Amino acid sequence: MSSVTDVKDKSPLANLGDSGAYQKLLAFASLIALLIGFSIASPNFMQTSNMIAILQATSVNGVLAVAATLVIITGGIDLSVGTLMTFCAVIAGVALTYLGLPLLFGVIAAIAAGAFCGLCSGTFVAKMKIPPFIATLGMMLILKGLSLVISGTRPIYFNDTPGFDQISRGSLIGEVIPALPIPNGVLILFLVAISASYILSRTVLGRYTFALGSNEEAVRLSGVNTDAWKMRIYALAGGICGIGGILIASRLNSAQPALGLGYELEAIAAVVIGGTSLSGGRGTILGTLIGALIMAVLTNGLRVLSVAQEWQTVVTGAIIILAVYADMVRRKKSG
Amino acid sequence: MDKQTPLVDMRDIQISFGGIHAVDHVSVDLHPGEVVGLLGHNGAGKSTLIKILSGAYQADGGEIYINGKKAEIHNPRDARRYNIETIYQTLALADNLDAASNLFLGRELTTPLGTVDDDAMEAETRNIMAKLNPNFQKFSEPVSALSGGQRQSVAIARAVYFDAKILIMDEPTAALGPHETQMVSELIQQLKTQGIGIFLISHDIHDVMELCDRASVMKNGKLVGTVNVDDVTDDDLLSMIILGKKPEGVAVQS
Ligand SMILES: Nc1ncnc2c1ncn2[C@@H]1O[C@H](COP(=O)(O)OP(=O)(O)OP(=O)(O)O)[C@@H](O)[C@H]1O
Ligand SMILES: [Mg+2]
């Protein structure tokens, strides 16, 4: 995690993070409090197998949350990250199981499909001027439907592709240090997060991501082709959702076409908890990672305590409202 | 005026917003090394007119000639290609970025690796700010944390940094203190000697009398007329602005 902060700290834009530093600290403290609380409440919580389950869940939600962070910083929103993840998993299933292509092609197909769908959303938003909420809501439904159509509403299994499940479930770290069987999915999440953090702080694309969320008209008046850059950002987010699709498919060793709805809200919750402003212009990947961990710990902890699934949904909703409220209060203070 | 080809010639420009004729068949021109003041009451159409030149709006009618050639300006990128730089009345800054990122927005300096070169951009920003506003020190804060005048300094720096040939200044000193305003006046004199043409929008008649060569007055979207500043008095200008009345016994273009 330190490397994620490092990238951020080198940037003169690090103050963008600082404006949310308080929220990040608060989020981190909440994470620790949750961990302690659940450990006291249940002896099963702190077990290695459960910790690994939490990390596995974080890896998928975290990757989607990173994608959502990019779009949210532009001042948009992406409601399609969950069903896009599933769609990409299904595409991987088609490539690997139906067409029998080699593993690498399946991965590339999933990421390319994600990027293409992101580009579509970006086009709706940038060129057709459809509000992001509506454009990605439509995309969410389109992709949900397409996943079911393409798969014939049945799961696609990856039993014929040896090693596919190891993408997420294997543990390179565990092979070196057996006491630390951290799943590869987590490793991939960190790679994605570090890359995204680097892009945000060091590239022109990252600069425009923040600028668009600050004042889109000013960016246009500065001679930037705002439409083209917005489309690129949505496409990048889509590609990252493709990686999420590979992760979930690998974890379940199957593409489950009915899955995906609801993931977008968890991802957005993680982003907001991490201090990224829903009104755009500010946010950090590190914050989003902490947010994703909180969501995973909370969901897992409530399950370990045998709280009914229905109540978990209630809690998620309440947390989103609280986090957004905290953001509003913070922004009022900073003017 | 002399018969040399104008740097900018805006002919018969018109634009309307839902029935309101914000700019109604207006023609203005600008020569190299000349400062032309644009005057008029609030809502007269001054900002709208120059936004057509800067590419922010597309005119419904009329033509723009630059150095005698017809110019196609469809967006701010096109305007930049003609070396038109603009200080907008609204400043057009990205609030969450710092001064350097705003100054170079759309024209970022990059390293050989293709990443943004924040150190170089900040160094350049410090350089130009030292000339424009030596008191300016807030280089690492987002511009939302700056005062109105400091923000205006950033917008001015951005417009003059990139070797403009045509400079549009829409109330550039509205938020500036007396000392900073004086520095902008000196800047305008200096840019003039470099042959840059400047459209200066201002409500301050004294500024206009002091800095401008000619003044074009607008009222309700229409051009009242253009006069040589040396030929008229403050009162003449005021009655053009308020009453839309051309001064008598003075050459007025329109
Ligand atoms: N984007 C827009 N949409 C609708 N109406 C507009 C728009 N921009 C300007 N107008 C209208 O056009 C007219 C001219 O506005 P403009 O901003 O050019 O005035 P101005 O001369 O710059 O005034 P001020 O001195 O207050 O800056 C006004 O009536 C304004 O309401
Ligand atoms: Mg104006």
Image (tube, coloured by chain):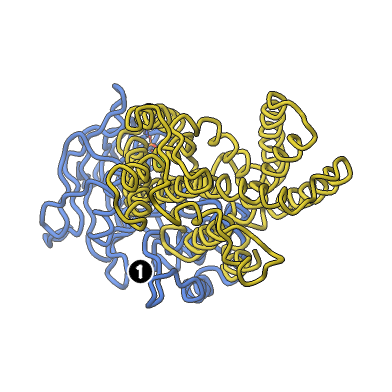
Closer-to-camera residue (A55/A322) = A55
Whether residue B249 sits left or right of residue A215 in the image: it is left
Point out residue B251 in the picture as x, y percentages from the top left corner.
21, 47
Whether residue A251 sits left or right of residue A96 in the image: it is right
Closer-to-camera residue (B227/A49) = A49
Residue A7 higher or lower than B242, as above or below: below
In which quarter of the view is residue B16 placed?
A: top left
Closer-to-camera residue (A35/A234) = A35
Quadrant of image for the C terminus of chain B = top left
Colour chain B is painted in: blue
Does residue B133 show up? yes
Report which residue position mark 1 lands on.
B191
Point out residue B253 in the picture as x, y percentages from the top left corner.
20, 45
Tag 1: Cα neighbours inside 10 Å, few (<14), some, or many (≥20)? Answer: many
Colour chain A is painted in: yellow
Q: Residue at x 37, y 48 (%)?
A: A110
What amino acid type is highlighted by mark number 1? Answer: Leu
